[in-house]
Image: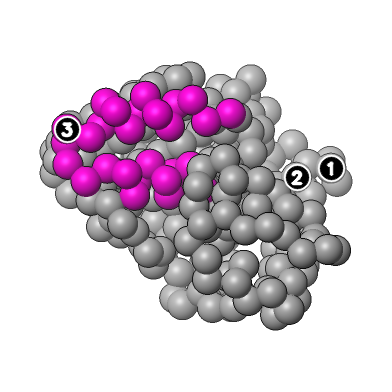
Amino acid sequence: MNGKKREFRLFIWKGARYRICSPLYDLITEEIKKQRSILEAYIQGHPDFKTSFRPLCLHSGAPSIAIQMARASEKTNVGPMAAVAGAIAEAGVKAACEAGAEEAIVENGGDIYLASSKEMFVGLYSGRGKLSDTLAFFIKPGDMPLAICSSSSRMGHSDSFGSCDLATVTAKDGALADAAATYVCNSVKKVEDIESVLEKSGTIPGVHGILIIKDNRIGMIGELPAIVKNPDPGLKNKITHDICWKF
C-alpha cells in the first residue's frame, strides 16, 4: 500500500478485543457497545440463542442483529453465535461509512469487515507449518465493503469440531462469512476432506470465496481476492485474542 501507513487502535469491551482503523473510531466503538447490549438483552430472555450449535427459530421482537445471525445460521447449519463477531464488525463499519468515513476496518480474532477507498493487504495466518504466515489477500477498493472471516481448530476461543489449520470465507455479509468459516472449519478433519468440503460449502448462497489450509495443503473455491506473498513480517503479533468473551 502506498501513502500513509494505517494506524489501528485496540478496543477492549467485555472480554472481546477489536483492532479498529478509522477516523471515526469513537463512533465505531459506540456502535459495537450498542449492538452487544442489544444482543445481550435478547439472549437474557432467550438463552438458547447463545448455547445452540444448530439453527433456531427466533422469538417475536428479535433485534436486527439477531435476525442477521439467525439467517447466517440457517444457511450454514451452525449455531447463531458462530456469526456474532462478523455481524458486530459489519455493524461498526457500516455505522462509520454511513456517517461519511472513507475508511473503516474492524477486526476481532480473525473476523474482519472492511471498507476503504484505498487498496490493502490482509494477512492469512494458519498458526503452523510452511504456510503459517506467508500469504495475504490483496484487496482492491472495488472489492469492498467485504467481510473476511476465519476459523481455526487450533487457534481462538470458539468451539471447533474439526481439525483445520485455517478456514477463511469472504462475503458481503459479515455474519454469513463468520458462520460459513465455522462450518467449513468444523467439516475439515483430514486433508482428504478439503475438496468435498469446498464443493459443498461453495454452494452456500451469498458466499463469495473459501480458502482452506490443512497440513500445508491449500484449497480454494469461488471469487477470492488475489493471493500474494505476505508483506508484513509482524503479522503474528497483530492477531487479536479475546480475553474472555461472555454474555
- Residue 221 visible in the displayed image: yes
Bounds of the magenta segment: 179-205
Task: State whether the magenta stretch is mostly helix, strand or loop.
Answer: helix
Residue labelled with disc 2: 94
- Please state the horizontal and vertical placement of residue 227, each as a whole percent of the image: 36, 24
Q: Which is nearer the N-term, disc 2 or disc 3?
A: 2
- Which residue lies under the disc numbered 1? 98
- The three-letter code of the residue at mark 1 reads Glu
Q: Nearer the viewer, mark 2 or mark 3?
A: 3
Task: Tell me the kind of residue under disc 3.
Answer: Glu
Residue 144, image quadrant: top right
Looking at the figure, which quarter contains the C terminus? bottom right
Q: Is residue 182 left or right of residue 215?
A: right
Q: Amino acid at mark 2?
A: Lys
Q: Residue at x 21, y 46 (%)?
A: 189
Task: Determine the residue positioned at 71% across, 68% down.
Answer: 39
Residue 77, relative to residue 218: is it above or below? below
Estimate how packed mark 2 is, as few (under 14), some (14 to 19) or many (20 or more) residues with alpha carbons within 10 Å. Answer: many
